[in-house]
Amino acid sequence: MSGQPIFILSEGSRRTKGSDAQNNNIMAAKAVAEAVRTTLGPKGMDKMLVDSMGDVIITNDGAAILREMDIEHPAAKMIVEISKTQDAEVGDGTTTAAVLAGELLANAEELLEDGIHPTIISAGYRLASEKAQEIVNSIALDASVDDVETLKKIAATAITGKGAEAHKDKLSELTVEAVRSITKTDAHGKVVADTDKIKVEKRAGGSIDDSVLIDGVIIDKERVHPNMPTRIEDAKILLLGAAIEYKKTETKSEIKITSPDQMLSFIEQEEAMLKEIINKVLASGANVVFCQKGIDDLAQYYLAKAGVLAARRIKQSDMTRLSEATNAKILTSIDEISAEELGEAKLVEEKETTGSKMIYVTGCPGVKSVSLFLRGGTEHVVDALDRAVEDAIRVVGVAIEDQKVVVGGGSPEIEVSLRLQEYAATLSGREQLAVAKFADALEIIPQTLAENAGLDPINMLAEMKAQHEKGNKNAGLNVYEGKVEDMYENSVLEPLRIKTQAINAATESTIMILRIDDVIASAKTMPMPQGMPGMGGMPPGMM
């Protein structure tokens, strides 16, 4: 019995231990970072992603790319999570975070090969991350909600490198105006920019220059009956979560009709029920109805006859936005309809754009809400425009809330890298090596910017370091001129939170991956290949 093996895992389970597990995880994570690396910066290339339904997405947004890629490897998924978190927290810098995490792991791999224990590397990386946060905070510049020019520069930087770059001046102006209009100060005196109050609607057709900012809410629906008015001033708005239809039994039922009189009576009763509902609506004084569910054909006729503008199948998010903007309550029962529950707006109007109609609700007295209406030549152009503007809205909101910005062009990474090298020299023990490797890893950002612009990364890095050592903390890479210049004068600005969040998220994920020395995969999950060919054991679609 003593020589008989004991099996504790189910049949088909795979187990990878020690250095093999670490190498496999690091290889997979590096492969994901490498996949998005070519998209970094203004000269970054785009990726074409085709999903299982055949839909095409063309983008260089790191979060969008990683979200659409069908990734199976668990360690690779952790790099995807970094991008998702960066996107949720800041809205931009998603590629930076993923590339930085990949380089931190690549440098950690070198230390592992030298025999340094993962916990020592983790401790060193944590020290370096804390010090990096301090350094990047020390070089940050002030910004405020009233500094419109700086905010426009931040928005333009976020849009640069994306498909909408040619129109960044127009889009930056719209974005900053939108974010500033919904910015307010809370009870504690903190500036809050709730970017959820900005609704972005897009429509193919026309030019990007036709994009406009509407002070109000745009509903992507049209009136339900052609005889309804297209324009109503001093609107009294009813928001209804219930259907305007005659009531149906909740259980399956049959009605037996034995004579024509009974049939006529049945139809008349249905009409009477609908008339009763419409009378309640009209009695409340409502002249605009937004219904989350259906509106019966006969009810549409009665509403049109009474001069009421109505729309149906409104999305829940739009109902909530309308409620906040117009001060109307969303009613879930017909019996609750009354004048006190209605909202107000100066104007509700249906407008036609490129063959489709939309309803504009403007002049609202409630919570400030604005809508950005984007136009573009094709669906792909409009989608790219939408992603660029969403990023710009988020970064401007973050900059307004934190009131701190840094210059771009790889400048902060070089400054932090140089200062971290000095900090590493003050440490004793093996953590010093990990801090030094962390500092080296930060150089991957300016290095990648240079490579993607077709420049010599070694020469560019050497020039940038020389400028920073002379005290020019804003020296960064102008990828258009191929020179090292002052990025503040070149109007390349980013919110401070982009850098702090990227460093923090990349460090935490790297440490988590480094501390794994045993991978046990059940037979029901993905197979764990030993050799990790190609893209680190990922599915063929990522090759």
Image (cartoon, rainbow, N blue to C red):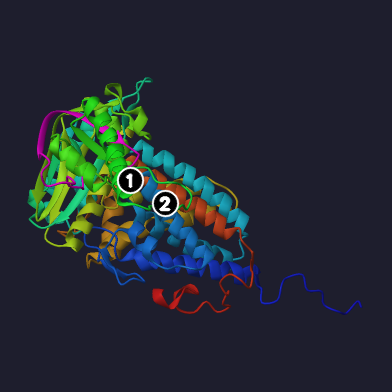
What amino acid is labelled 1 in the image?
Answer: Phe
**Magenta stretch encompasses residue 246:** no
Magenta range is: 218-243
Question: Quadrant of residue 115 in the image?
Answer: bottom right
The residue positioned 43% from the left and 41% from the top of the image is 133
Q: Position of residue 469 (x, y in %)?
A: 31, 47
| Residue designated by label 1 | 266
Q: Quadrant of residue 20?
A: bottom right
Q: Secondary structure at mark 1?
A: helix
User: What amino acid is at disc 2?
Assistant: Ile
Q: Is residue 147 above or below residue 1?
A: above
Q: Are marks 2 and 1 in contact (CB under 8 Å)?
A: yes
- Residue 168 appears in the figure: yes
- The residue furthest right is 1
- Residue indicated by mark 2: 255
Q: Nearer the viewer, residue 125 or 308?
A: 308
